[in-house]
Image (cartoon, grey):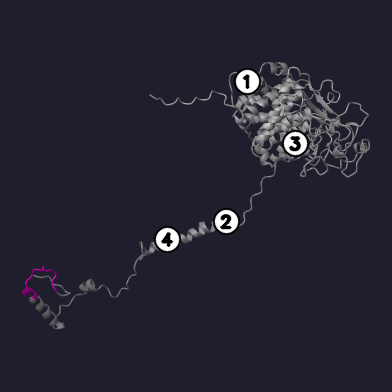
Amino acid sequence: MHARNHWGGSFEINGGDSSAAEDDQRSREWDRAALQPPQQHHELDETQQSWLLGNHNQRPQKNKYVDLGCVVCSRKALKWTGWAFVAAFFLIALPVIIVKTVPRHKPRPPPPDNYTVALHKALLFFNAQKSGKLPKNNPIPWRGNSGLQDGNATTDVKGGLVGGYYDAGDNTKFHFPMAFAMSMLSWSVIEYSHKYEAVGEYNHARDLIKWGTDYLLLTFNSSATKIDKIYSQVGGSQNGSKTPDDHYCWTRPEDMDYPRPVQTANSGPDLAGEMAAALASASIVFRDDAAYSKKLVKGAATVFAFARDSGRRTPYSRGNPYIDPYYNSTGYFDEYMWGAAWLYYATGNKSYISLATNPGIPKNSKAFYMVPDLSVLSWDNKLPAAMLLLTRLRVFLNPGYPYEDMLSMYQNVTGLTMCSYLHQFNVFNWTKGGMIELNHGNPQPLQYMANAAFLASLYVDYMNATGVPGWNCGPNFITSDTLRSFATSQIDYILGKNPMKMSYVVGFGAKYPKHVHHRGASIPNDHKKYSCTGGWKWRDTRNNNPNTINGAMVAGPDRFDQFKDVRANYSYNEPTLAGNAGLVAALVSLTESGGRTIDKNSIFSAVPPLYPVTPPPPPPWKP
């Protein structure tokens, strides 16, 4: 039987091999079915109709999918995706657009600390002391060209001895303290170049150093390998002189018209050793200028060979009335150690480190005698600086044998030097106002304080760089913070935290000396030339100096913390080149600008490997 098909016909499918009779019969059946009257059709109930026709009372549902061509997705998913993009735009894209299009306003940097402010000014003092033909950008408006005839009688120096720096309030160029000042500036730049860059003074400091080293190269035949003399001074005077000279006259350097004699040293291991230190340390500062650095190294080696000449061991100042009363040298073995250390760092030549660690050097310089005065750094005594510089080698490179024994002794003495600076050990006297009396209460104490503050601050940075929290002073462990506090207390005293409530750096703070013992600063720049004695009225007037010599650190107070702002009294009121160099070094070491770190490695750039180099592998075996 066939199942009933309400759409007409059977559910069965017959094969293609049915007979023609069967096809004819089926055709007749379809015809009869089509001819039956409508009333004879079988009625479908509601359920069957709903199966076939669906519910005509319900609204047709929308298609829930959207054909995007390459993909078919749900209409609901597409809607949520669109809203997600809108939300992302407002939450992410719109703020980014606003940030990119609105002009940026950088946050104001924190104000510089007092040490940075004072550093800017202290460097300007060197610009005020320049001699020779000044560059157009010299920042001291009341200074001009001067000393253009200096050394014009020296036939072996082309152009004469023009340039360099005047030492203090007079117009004399003392080469011994000038070289020391350049060594100190170079050392500070080598250790703290990043700080100089952070405060915008790196190029300025390099310019000041080069001004000095260019001049020092003129004072001897720097192109030779062996020399027989050094020009040790230009200008000056003899004590009690009544003839026109740098002390008798009160004249602006631009108006000098009196004779300026040149002093010549045919021996001078102290002067030559300091000049070698200045040139060698500067060569490290200028390593980015290969030609100039090489020139400095060559000059340093030449002048140091002069210092080591066994036939030229007389101090440069001995018997010279133009030098001895002012910058008399008390020895030269400290300059041997100091100069040899810098030449080793500049060249890597082991003969220099062998000399610096030769037992004869500390023996003759009394480096291990623990004499308190020998722990005080000055233009005359380089021992504490030289031993700290060599301690650096042991701390960071640890070269071992054959240098270890002597370097460890240098480090021990350096630690004891730092102990001597601390008030609790009573090695030196202190004023009630908090000033350490490194020169036994004698005049001009501030330069020694500044130098000690620099050494102490640098020693702390060496300890911090190696993760050492302190050192021992006998049975007492002293933290590095204690030593840092000493350094800051002494510089703070100079900057105004003293019983006089006065800054001893001109131009810093609200109260500072106004009658500085300085010829150029005390005479008006009014285009009038004052004679040798015609300038005395400016020396003796009670009026303030017409020109402010910014950054000049004066000599300082007495042992009772009292200070007299009197121009004629140089013991209180005269600045010096060497003093300001120590101040600059101390200030840059203490400033927070650029961070509390040192440049550990630049100084060692020329130092060769301290251990045997691993040999290359043998060549491959060939049968």
Position of 471 compared to 503: left or right? Answer: left
Identify the residue position indicated by label 3 in the image. 211
Are the residues at dot 4 and dot 2 in contact (C-beta closer than 8 Å)?
no
Q: Is residue 603 above or below residue 2?
A: above
Structural crowding at the residue carrying mark 4, measured as other residues with C-alpha within 10 Å and reported as few (<14), some (14–19) or many (≥20): few
Question: Percent from the top left, x then y, of residue 223?
Answer: 72, 29
How far apart are the alpha carbons under marks 4 and 3? 71 Å
Name the quarter where the C terminus is drawn.
Answer: top left
**Whether label 1 touches label 4, CB < 8 Å:** no
- Disc 3 vs disc 1: which is toward the camera? 3
Inspect the image, locate mark 4, and give the three-letter code of the amino acid beneath it.
Answer: Thr
Which circle marks residue 543 in the picture? Answer: none
Q: Amino acid at mark 1?
A: Ser
* Spatial CA span between label 4 and label 2: 27 Å
Quick check: can you spot residue 217? yes
Image disc number at residue 81: 4
What residue is shown with label 1?
Answer: 408
Q: Earlier in the sequence, mark 4 or mark 3?
A: 4
In the image shown, does 26 or 169 lie closer to the viewer? 169
Vertically, is 143 above or below 310?
A: below
User: Which callout, 3 or 1, points at the residue further toward the start of the chain?
Assistant: 3
In space, the residues marked 3 and 2 are separated at their CA atoms by: 47 Å
- Do callouts 3 and 2 mark residues in contact (Cβ within 8 Å)? no
- Residue 495 locus on image (x, y percent): 76, 36
Q: Is residue 560 at all visible to an observer of this figure?
A: no
Q: Secondary structure at mark 1?
A: helix
